[in-house]
Image (cartoon, rainbow, N blue to C red):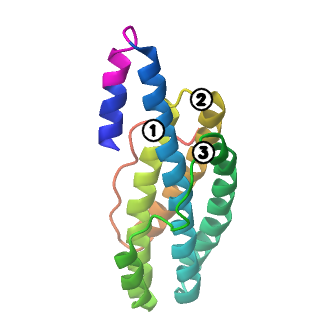
Amino acid sequence: MKKIGMALAVAGMAVGVCGVSVAQDTKSADKSFIKDATEGSQAEINFAKLALEKSKDPNVRKFAEKMITDHSKLIEDMRPFAAKYDVKASGEPVMDHAKYEELKMKSGISFDRAYVEAMVKDHNDDLQAFIKEENSTSDPELKATVAKGEKVVYEHTQMIDNIAHMGGIQTPPLPEGANGL
């Protein structure tokens, strides 16, 4: 993602010379975001289903249920943009398969702690990606959808950070620009 951001910054300086280059770079970044957001949402759903199988903690279970509902909606919200930008999802969620397998082997408090830690990291990273896309896309319809999704991811981040704090798990500060508005 840093390379994309750098490419956009360089392209932005070249607006006077070649405006088409900027549009192409932005479109490329939009396509990458749409693919990552869709596949990442499917991974969230898979991890949440595992949490519903393995966790007995009511807070973790409530969070997992919300992940399934909200990330299914995010996938639906991205579908028109996937068609518009001709983005073909791989059908395979973008997920840490090693982490998933590790979680499958855990149970009880050990599972809950590992799941919460994974979700804290993932949602802070996702929130940063949504903020970046909202600030960089030139497509007003995509921008509105990303802003709506950012609010959802912000809510998830706050929710999982609160669960983490209850369990004595440290969380990073929210990404710059995160406000859930």
Q: Residues within 10 Å of mark 2 (few under 14, many from 20)?
A: few
**Position of residue 31 measured from the top left corner of the image (x, y, whole percent):** 51, 43
Residue in the image at 39% along x and 44% along y: 175
Q: Earlier in the sequence, mark 2 or mark 3?
A: 3
Which residue type carries mark 1? Ala
154 or 168: nearer the viewer: 154
Q: Is residue 103 above or below residue 39?
A: below
Q: Quadrant of residue 124?
A: bottom left
Question: How far apart are the alpha carbons under marks 3 and 1?
Answer: 13 Å
Q: Is residue 153 above or below residue 139?
A: below
Residue in the image at 44% along x and 81% along y: 112
Residue ID for mark 2: 139
Labels 3, 1: front one: 3
Taking the image as shown, residue 78 lies to the left or right of residue 150, namely right
Which residue type carries mark 2? Asp
125 or 157: nearer the viewer: 125
**Position of residue 71 measured from the top left corner of the image (x, y, whole percent):** 62, 61
Residue ID for mark 1: 29
Residue at disc 2, secondary structure: loop
Q: Earlier in the sequence, mark 3 or mark 1?
A: 1
Which residue type carries mark 3? Asp
Residue 138 included in the magenta stretch of the image = no
Q: Quadrant of the C terminus?
A: top right
Q: Which residues are magenta?
A: 10-17
